[in-house]
Structures are given as C-alpha cells and as structure tokens.
Amino acid sequence: MLNYKHVKYFFILAVIVGLSWCCWHVWRSRLAPYFVGQDKTPPSVEPQIPDSAPALPPPVADVPGNEPAISGDLQMLLAQAKQEFQEEKLLASRQTAYSGLEKCEEYSPSWLEFAQVIDNVNKVFMNGSAPAPEKKRYVIVAGDKLTKIAYRLNTTVEALQKLNSLSRTSAIIYPGNPLMYIDGTWSIKISKKDFLLCLYLDDKLYRFYKISTGRHDRTPSGNFIVSQKQMNPAWTYEGRIIPFGDPQNVLGTRWIGLKPVDEVNLALTGYGIHGTTEPENIGKPASLGCIRMLNEEVEELYDFIPNSFKETEIKVLITE
C-alpha cells in the first residue's frame, strides 16, 4: 500500500512534470523560431478602414468634352461682366468680358461664356441707338444719298437704316441731319469643327453665330473674301434655277458669296454664307459645302457686311 511518504513524492513529481511541460511549450512558441530558422516575420495585416470613412470618387476618364471647370478668377470676371450687363453698364460689361476672353483658349467653354456676354452687348449696339466708341457721327450734306454715304464710310445702306431708325422703304434723307455708323473693318472667321462663325471688328470679336457646314467635309478651308450679296436668292443647282420661295430652294433669305484668294484653289467657286430652310440642322454638317445660318441671323450679318471693294476687302477665314 502507498503510505503518506509515497503520496508526497508522487505529488512533487507531478508538479515537476507539469512545470517542465509548460516551460517547453513556451520555449517552442516564443523562442524556438529564433534558433531553429523558422520565418520570424510577423504576418501582414490588411489595414482596416472604419465604416464611417468616405468612399473615394471613381477616376474621371480623360475624354473629349470633359473640360476643366472655369477657374475662380475667371468665374469672378464672368459674374462681374454679367452683372454689369444686367445693370445696363454695357461698355463696362464688354470690357470685363474682353479681359476674360483673353485668358481663355479659343472656343473653349470658358471662352464661349465670355463671348456670349460680348455678343449680347454688341447686339444692343448694332440694333439701336446706344452709344459706343466704334459708333461715329456723320452729318448729311447736300447731294448725299444713302448709297453714296455707305460706300464712303465702308458700311451698308441697311446698317445706316438700322442704326438710325430710318425707313426701309424710303431713301429720303435731309442735309444737316446726323447719321450714326459703325467705324472699322469687318472680318469673319469660321471654325468648321466648332460650327461657329465669328464676326470681328478691327480684329476684335464682335458677334458670333452657330452654323451648319458641309456634309462629308465638303466645306473648303482657307482664305476668302466677300464677293457678292443677294437678298431672297435663287438657287442654281444641277443646271436648274430654283427661285426664292420654292420649297426646293435651301438658301433661305440671304446669300453672301465667297471668292477664294491666296493659296486657296481658285476653282472653288459657288461657295457662300446663306440662310436655311432647315433650322433644325444648325450645329451639324448638313449642306453641300456652304455655310448655313439661321435666317434672322444671316439677315443681321448681311446688313452690316459690305461688299468687298478694291480699297477694302472683307476677309473670311475658314479653319478646320
């Protein structure tokens, strides 16, 4: 039988065995890797993002038409120009808009914003008696006729009538009366890819209009001059003369003929700027090669653009 002494020795032995097992387990799990060549690099841990962290926006693709927003300085200038226009401070509004336009890439969204303000201001100047630096005063003398005055001042009878609220049906004028006219040289620049016709006065943007161009890139590029003008034009097409008012006549209410110059193929005849019977196609390639405008807009352009004379040529640049 086990006596008390034997039980005591058995208990001591069990304690020693238990302590030895614990020490061996600790050594194996904590210290052994440093001595037996196991990988001692701790496992990588994925960083945990709190649920409340905002999600990042998806990247924006660099595609055409995804233009950067107008910068803060330009936004302030644009807001100022618009406010001045609303307050009828026309000259201040135009000058502010010109300042912004000079800082923009041509035909960019920001350029168009400033150009629209300039267009709004100059539309007022072209269609009324509001004063502007480019509007000069001429006093009628005995023997004057509107046609003679228009030729002398490099303008048109229609522009004189519009600026001075004269009757379109009467050419009567009186010596001693003043006439206002816009002084300067007009020119036109057309961007085919942007479907824009820009009217310049002394090389400064004055007005701009949306247009249609030729299908399949039929509108030629290069330098032209205004060669002829015609109201209510007939259309010569495939040997036929289609009169104004005929549903098949696509020229609209005005024709401004273009003549090629410089290095443009001089055989490119028959091109011009005209109205349209298809206003829904403005802003698209839709013609046989000519530049189409809304009828009311080509009529306005027609009124102010004189024919080219030997002394003064009205230049038209068509770009890609």
Image: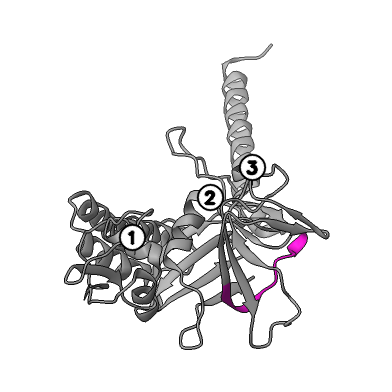
Q: Which residue is mark 3?
A: 24
Residue 161: give its label.
1
Q: Is residue 158 visible?
A: yes
Instruction: Give the position of the N terminus as an image quadrant.
Output: top right
Coloured how? one colour
Query: Which residue is rendered at x = 42% and y = 66% of the image?
Result: 304
Residue 295: give its label.
2
Marks 1 and 2: which is nearer the front? Answer: 1
Query: Which residue is rendered at x = 76% and y = 79% of the image?
Result: 267
- Front-most of residues 145 and 201: 145
Mark 1–mark 3 distance (CA, rounded to whole Å): 112 Å
* View extreme (top): residue: 1
The amino acid marked with disc number 1 is: Gln
The disc, 1 or 2, on the residue closer to the chain's N-terminal end is 1
Marks 2 and 3: which is nearer the front? Answer: 2
Mark 1–mark 2 distance (CA, rounded to whole Å): 19 Å
In the figure, is residue 156 to the left or right of 236? left
Residue 175: give its label.
none
The disc, 2 or 3, on the residue closer to the chain's N-terminal end is 3
Q: Position of residue 145 (x, y in %)?
A: 33, 71
Query: Which residue is rendered at x = 70% and y = 42% of the image?
Result: 247
